[in-house]
Image: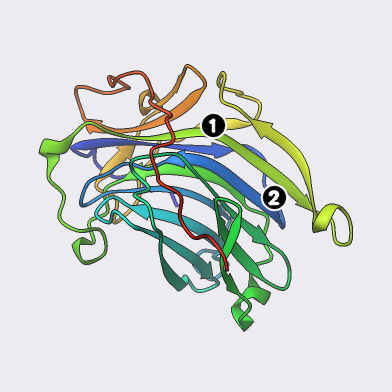
Amino acid sequence: MANLLPAKTYKGAELRTLSTYLYGKFEVRMKSAAGSGLLSSFFTYYDGTGLPANWNEIDIEIMGRYTDQEQFNVISPGQVNHVYSHNSPFNPHQGFHVYSFEWTPDYIAWSVDGYEVYRQTGDHIEGITRAQKIMMNIWPPDNVGWAGSFNPDILPVYAYYDWVRYYSYTPGVNDNFTLQWTDDYTSWNQGRWAKATHTFDGNNCDFIPANAVFNNGYMILCLTDAVNTGYNGDPVGDEDIDPPYMAWA
C-alpha cells in the first residue's frame, strides 16, 4: 500500500492497528469531514504480500461531497470492487453516528446506528479470508469523478472518532460476536495503534503523525496544508442534533 513518492502539497492522517483480525464485528462512533474532494473512513485492510492478487479489504467510506450518503465496499482478490452507496436520513458530517460491519465466512453486513442496512453474500466473500488491520484515514483522492473536485480553501478539515470496538466471531455464542476490546481514545494506546507515515498512488496527500491527534477523549484525523498541521479547531461538539428518523419497519 505504501509507496516512496515525492512530498505532496496536502497532509492527511491514518491510524491503524498493530494486530490483524480474521472475522468479527468492527464498530466505530464517528463524525466525518465535509467537503468535496475528500473522504473519511473506517475499514479493515490486508497489508501483506502478493497484492493485488491477494487483496482483502472491507470499507466504510464517507465522501465529503455528499450530505446523506455512506459507501460500503468489499475489495476482493485482484483488487475487484463491490461498492454499494447507502442513503441516510441525516448528514454524517454534522453529528456522531455508529457505523459497523460484521465479517463472517458467509457474509459481510453493514449497520448504521445499530440497524443492518446492507449485506453481501456473493461468491467473492469466499475470497475474503486474510487477517486484516483496522484502519481509519482522511485523504483527498485524485479521482474527481468519485470524490469530486477539491478546493484547498476549505482546509483544515477534520474527522472525529469517539470510540472503536472489536468483537471476535463466536458462532453460536453471544449472537455470534463477543466483545474483545473498546478504545475510548482517552489517550494514544501505542500497544494497539500506529500512526501512518506513507502515501500511495491516487492519494493527493501524505499521511503524517502530527495529523492524528488525541484530544479530550476523541481521536481526530486532520487534513491540512503542509504548514498548519495538527488540530486547530474548536472543542469537539457532540450534541444530538439529528431529528428522529425511521430506521426499520
Kindly check if marks 2 and 1 are in contact, taking CB atoms under 8 A apart as contact. Answer: no
The amino acid beneath tag 1 is Ala
As displayed, is residue 165 above or below residue 59?
Answer: above
Q: CA distance from mark 2 to mark 1?
A: 15 Å
Residue at the spot 77% in from the left edge and 42% down from the top edge: 179
Residue 189 in the image: state x and y as whole percent: 61, 23
The answer to whether residue 111 is above or below residue 98 is below
Question: Mark 2 is on which residue type?
Answer: Tyr
Q: Which residue is found at the position 45% from the left and 55% from the top?
A: 245
Residue to which mark 1 is pinned? 194
The quarter of the picture where residue 229 lies is top left
SS class, disc 1: strand
Q: Could you classify mark 2 by the number of other residues whose Cα lies within 10 Å: few (under 14), some (14-19), or many (20 or more)?
A: some
Quadrant holding the C terminus: bottom right
Q: How is the image coloured?
A: rainbow
Relative to 109, 216 lies left or right: left
* Residue with the most extreme right position: 172
Position of residue 26 in the picture relative to residue 156 (left or right): right
Near-viewer residue (203 or 114): 114
Horizontal and vertical percent position of residue 194: 54, 31
Q: Earlier in the sequence, mark 2 or mark 1?
A: 2
Q: Position of residue 237 (x, y in %)?
A: 38, 26
- Residue 48 image point, x, y percent: 59, 54
Q: Does residue 67 appear left or right of residue 127 in this picture?
A: left
Crowd band around label 1 with a 10 angstrom C-alpha radius: few (<14), some (14–19), many (20+): some
Secondary-structure class at tag 2: loop
> From the viewer's perspective, is 182 left or right of 233?
right
Residue bearing the label numbered 2: 21
Residue at 27%, 19% in the rendered image: 232
Viewer-side residue, 181 vs 239: 239
Q: Image point 37% across, 23% down: which residue?
A: 210
